[in-house]
Structures are given as structure tokens and as C-alpha cells.
């Protein structure tokens, strides 16, 4: 971005909630089913059918609000958003207008949420993006555009959809990326949504304007549609900000409009201008009664999970991990649970973290398995770290034992015993081996005594060889020094 | 909003209703009466009245998150103007 310009970015994120049934009827919420097999008079918008609120959808929205430090409204209600489009045959979408369930709140942008290539140069470390509101509405049907007609599938119509609206606090494409990454993780942690953008479980509209830093007034607000991945959002914003700056530099005037992102071509194209903007004529839905949230808030509070950013801080504090290690572990909820099961009570939580993040992750990756399917039990990993830590096996052997544990599921003590890997720490036995080596190498002993102190390494190597690698190297060194002094 | 400010043609367009000039005049007069009545309500002193979001003093009508059987697809599609491969077919729309 040219440095005399600045961008102002706000995001509207739509999230499909993980409920079993739809928002206002008992039809199943199912992804990828045959078209129109999960419909009923209510979600088809047939005359006379009445909606009844799904309590779980309200609870999941309030839970999201609590995780993101929103204020939960004591009373909220539903309104009709009127428009004509075949994806919503009753000609209005049930949404929330002036009394949404959550207001304010924030999403923290932590370092690891940024794209990898941008983590080294974060413009505003520790930034928090403020939220305006979170409200609940019903999703619309899915349209398929054919040559000469449009086909409609109502399976998605009426499924609970949560909308999270940010303040225009974001200034850079990388911050939009971090915002979505952090938000997505919170949603997964809370069990609110699977938040998979490719499946449409998390959808995002972006508003972006550009102005000269010296200008007080915001530039024309341009809305971007058709953003299907978090990295796509970053690319679309980078393109669009550049396009707007170039237009302004050419002396053009930008107008409020909606543009479509084409991820293959890597560019945005005009969809519609402000002239055709909608007038939704919201009014309260008389079919639905208002909600007093106090009746379910206590239960929601009891479900409040540790947020990813709280976990990150706790892992650093409780286990002495670096910020980076804590971040990698907290990014992956099952992995961090595994780590904690293995590290709790261990004398070397950092070594446990290293095994989890290096050996375990690469073994799981190679085997195509998830942490939940991991053949190594957390307590066995803890035992392995203890064996290495106490010097009963060396770290090289530790790696080998780990591979064996991963492929067989056998505990490390048994593997060490079976393979005869146990390090020789018996002083008498080590001394005997040292004496044997000293007797066999009089020339080297003479060099050592003559002041060539590195010669002891040769002797040490001979002892290790004689012991078939089993002797405790530290003890061998001490014993040789003692015998030769 | 007074009846002079009422743009009947715009409201008709939003509702996708085509009106004759006579109908526009009739609705302007009738809707004007409605707005006058609302304006009268606006003048009432409601300082001591608790706001409500609905005309009934009832809150929290919920259902548990349980799946109920849906309509058989043939039944759901029975009123479709046209259909193909289980989809409702409508005139091609672009957004």
C-alpha cells in the first residue's frame, strides 16, 4: 500500500451454528444431503405455518457473545427483513434489527493468527478488533444458476445463522486474515460451529474504503462478495485496496458499490452500484415473542470454555513454554489437550512439548492420523521423557523408542527392556570398561597425561563402543578423568 | 411522517405491486389516515409505561433442539412451478 493512503476495513461474518434442527422448525440441519429432503411448511414459507425458536441456537449465540466479551441483551427480539428473491419464498428473512442478542465485544489478533509470511512484521501487535453486534437469523435456500433457469434447494433455508459485525477497525489485509483466523478458532473452541469456509459454514462480506492519511472523511465504502477462504479475503483486499488507490491517483471518484471477487483471476468486478441498494423495511415479526435471556444465561455461562487466547497464556505460565510453543499447541484444541495430559506432573514439560510438536506431529502426519487416533498414550509419552531426562536412555535412543511406541502402542519401559537399550549407569561396570580401554591404549593415555586433553574423547568413544552404546556418557567421562588423574 | 411525505409509488414498488394513478390517490388518502392515527399515539405521554416488543406480555416461547420428520420430497415439490432433479425451478435470477 502506498504509505500516504490508509484503508478502513469492516467484516460481516455469517456463521452456521452446530444445532441438530433448524432455527424455527424441526427439520434436520444437514450438509450435503439430496436437495429438498429437509423441508416443511415453515421453512418452505407456506402460508399459515408458524415459527418457533430453537433455544439451543439462542444459547450458542449467547455463548459466542460471552467468549468475545460482548454485552448480552436482557431482552432481544426478531424482525422481518423484507425482500423478494426466490431463496426466501415468504418474502422476508427473520433476523434481528434493533434488539440483537449481543452487542460490542472484541476479537484479539494474536501473532500466530496472522499469515505465516506476515508474522515477522506485524504492524499492530496485540491489536483487538471491536465488534458492533452479534445477531441471529435464518439462512436462506441455496440457488443453482443454470442456462435458462434457477434451481432452488431449501435444505439450508431456515437453518440458524449467526452474524458477527465488526467495527471498521481493520487497516490491512493481513489483519482481516488474523481476525478471521482468531474468530474461527474461538467458534471451534466453543463448539458453536465447525466454521469451515469451504463448506459455507463461515461466510464473510467485507467492506473496504481507502483515503489519504491527511483526509478526515472516509472514502466510498465498497462491499466485496464471493470470498470463500481466509486467504482469499486477504488476496481480495490486497487487490481491492490497490485498485482503489490507483483509481484515486488517476483522479477518479469512487462510489459506493458491491464488487465480486474472482479468486482464479485474482480481481474484483462490479456487481451493483448504490442506486440499486436495498430498502428492507424491517419491522418486528408478530409471529415470534420477545426473548428474556436471563432464563438461559446461567446455563450458557457454565458452558463457557477457556478461550484460545486464555489457553495460550496459561500454557506459557503453567508449563514454562515459549509464546510460540504455547501458540502452536493452543491453535489445536485436541493437540493441546494431549499435551496437557502428558505434561501434567512431568518434570520436563518443555521436553514433552518438543516431542508433541515435532515427533508426534510428524508421525501423525505421515500416518494420516488425528491426535484423537494417536497410538501413543499421553502417560507413555510422559514416561519416555522421564527416561531420557534421568539419563536412562540418551536422546537419540529416545527418538527411536518413540517411533517404536508409535508403531506398536507399547509403553517405553517395555521397549527399552526388550531392546536392551537401558543405559549402563552401574559405576562398577563402567569402571571395569574404562580400565580395559586405558590398558589397551597406552599411547593415548600418555598423550592425555602429557597435556593433550582432547585425547580423552577417543578413550570415551572406545568405552562407549565396548558398551555397545549403553554406557551413560556422562558417567564414562567422569570415571575416565578420575582414573587418569 | 405525514401523509404528504408518503411516497405511495415507492412503497408499491418495494411491495412489487403495480398501481393505477387512481389507486395511488386512494392509498395515499387511506394510508394517510393510518399515519395520522400513529401520530396521535406518538403524542401520548408514556413516561411511566414499560416498553414492550410485542402486544402480548409473553416471553420465551422456545422449542428444544430436536429433529422432527420433514415432508417427503414429492410433497414439498408439489406446488413447484417447475422442477428438475429435486430442485424447485424458477425464472433465472441473477444477484
Image (cartoon, coloured by chain):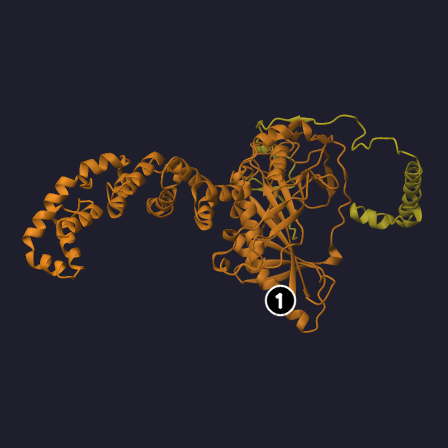
Q: Residues within 10 Å of mark 1 (few under 14, many from 20)?
A: some
Judge whether A403 appears above or below A118 on screen.
above
Subunit that carries the residue with mark 1: A
* Residue lying farthest to the front in this orientation: A485
Question: Can I make out residue B14 in this image?
Answer: yes
Which chain is rendered yellow in the image? B
Q: Quadrant of residue A288?
A: top right
- Res B38 → quadrant: top right
Q: Which chain is orange?
A: A
Tell me if residue A453 comes above or below residue A467 in the rendering: below
Q: Position of residue A282 (x, y in %)?
A: 76, 42
Image point (70%, 73%), residue name? A251
Q: Nearer the viewer, residue A475 or A273?
A: A475
Q: Which residue is painted at 67% across and 54% down in the image?
A: A168
Q: Position of residue A20 (x, y in %)?
A: 56, 32
x and y, in percent, of residue A271 in the image: 66, 58
Which element type, helix, strand or loop, lies under badge 1? helix
Residue B18 visible in the picture: no
User: x%, y% of residue B90?
Assistant: 64, 46
* A105 to the left or right of A451: right
Total marks shown come to 1
Looking at this view, is B14 or A325 the one in front? Answer: A325
Residue at image mark 1: A243
Nearest the viewer among A119 and A211 is A119
Amino acid at each position: 500500500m502506498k504509505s500516504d493512503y490508509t484503508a478502513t476495513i469492516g467484516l460481516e461474518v455469517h456463521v452456521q451454528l452446530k444445532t441438530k434442527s433448524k432455527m424455527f422448525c424441526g427439520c434436520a440441519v444437514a450438509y450435503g444431503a439430496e436437495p429438498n429432503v429437509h423441508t416443511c411448511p415453515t421453512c418452505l414459507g407456506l402460508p399459515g405455518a408458524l415459527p418457533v425458536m430453537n433455544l439451543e441456537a439462542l444459547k450458542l449465540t449467547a455463548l459466542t457473545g460471552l467468549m468475545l466479551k460482548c454485552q448480552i441483551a436482557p431482552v432481544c427480539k426478531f424482525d422481518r427483513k423484507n425482500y423478494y428473491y426466490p431463496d426466501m419464498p415468504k418474502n422476508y428473512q427473520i433476523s434481528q434489527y434493533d434488539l440483537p442478542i449481543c452487542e460490542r465485544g472484541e476479537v484479539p489478533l494474536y501473532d500466530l493468527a496472522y499469515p505465516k509470511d506476515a508474522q515477522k512484521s506485524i504492524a499492530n501487535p496485540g491489536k483487538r478488533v471491536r465488534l458492533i453486534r452479534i445477531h441471529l437469523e435464518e439462512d436462506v435456500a441455496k440457488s443453482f444458476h443454470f442456462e435458462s433457469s434457477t434451481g432452488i434447494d431449501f435444505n439450508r433455508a431456515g437453518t440458524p445463522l449467526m452474524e458477527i459485525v465488526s467495527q471498521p477497525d481493520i487497516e490491512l489485509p493481513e489483519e482481516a486474515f488474523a481476525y478471521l483466523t482468531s474468530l474461527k478458532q474461538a467458534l471451534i473452541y466453543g463448539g458453536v460451529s465447525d466454521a469451515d469456509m469451504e463448506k459455507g459454514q463461515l461466510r464473510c462480506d467485507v467492506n473496504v474504503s481507502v483515503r489519504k492519511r491527511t483526509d478526515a472523511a472516509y472514502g466510498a465504502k465498497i462491499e466485496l462478495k464471493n470470498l470463500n477462504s481466509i486467504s482469499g479475503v486477504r488476496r481480495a483486499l490486497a487487490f481491492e485496496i490497490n485498485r482503489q488507490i490507483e483509481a484515486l491517483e488517476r483522479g477518479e471518484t469512487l462510489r459506493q458499490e458491491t464488487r465480486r471477487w474472482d479468486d482464479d483471476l485474482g480481481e474484483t468486478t462490479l456487481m451493483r452500484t448504490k442506486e440499486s441498494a436495498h430498502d428492507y423495511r424491517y419491522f418486528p415479526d408478530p409471529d415470534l415473542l420477545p426473548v428474556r435471556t436471563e432464563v438461559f444465561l446461567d446455563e450458557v455461562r457454565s458452558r463457557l470454555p477457556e478461550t484460545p487466547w486464555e489457553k495460550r497464556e496459561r500454557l506459557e505460565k503453567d508449563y514454562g513454554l515459549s509464546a510460540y510453543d504455547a501458540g502452536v499447541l493452543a491453535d489445536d484444541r485436541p493437540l493441546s489437550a494431549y499435551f496437557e495430559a502428558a505434561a501434567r506432573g512431568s518434570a520436563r514439560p518443555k521436553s514433552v512439548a518438543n516431542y508433541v510438536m515435532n515427533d508426534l506431529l510428524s508421525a501423525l502426519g505421515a500416518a494420516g492420523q488425528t491426535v484423537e487416533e494417536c497410538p501413543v498414550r499421553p502417560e507413555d509419552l510422559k514416561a519416555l521423557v522421564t527416561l531420557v531426562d534421568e539419563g536412562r536412555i540418551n536422546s537419540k535412543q529416545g527418538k527411536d523408542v518413540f517411533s517404536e511406541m508409535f508403531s506398536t502402542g507399547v509403553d517405553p519401559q517395555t521397549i527399552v527392556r526388550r531392546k536392551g537399550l537401558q543405559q549402563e549407569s552401574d559405576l562398577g561396570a563402567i569402571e571395569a570398561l574404562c580400565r580395559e580401554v586405558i590398558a589397551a591404549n597406552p599411547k593415548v593415555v600418555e598423550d592425555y597425561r602429557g597435556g593433550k586433553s582432547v585425547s580423552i574423547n577417543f578413550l570415551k568413544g572406545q568405552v562407549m563402543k565396548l558398551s555397545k552404546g549403553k554406557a551413560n556418557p556422562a558417567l564414562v567421562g567422569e570415571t575416565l578423568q578420575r582414573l587418569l588423574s | 411522517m405525514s401523509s404528504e411525505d408518503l411516497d405511495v409509488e415507492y412503497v408499491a414498488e418495494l411491495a412489487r405491486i403495480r398501481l393505477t394513478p387512481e389507486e395511488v390517490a386512494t392509498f395515499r388518502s387511506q394510508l394517510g389516515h393510518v399515519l395520522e392515527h400513529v401520530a396521535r399515539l406518538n403524542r401520548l405521554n408514556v413516561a411511566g409505561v414499560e416498553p414492550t416488543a410485542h402486544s402480548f406480555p409473553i416471553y420465551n416461547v422456545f422449542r428444544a433442539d430436536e429433529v422432527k420428520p420433514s415432508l417427503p420430497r414429492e410433497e414439498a415439490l408439489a406446488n413447484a412451478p417447475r422442477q428438475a432433479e429435486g430442485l424447485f425451478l424458477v425464472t433465472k435470477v441473477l444477484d
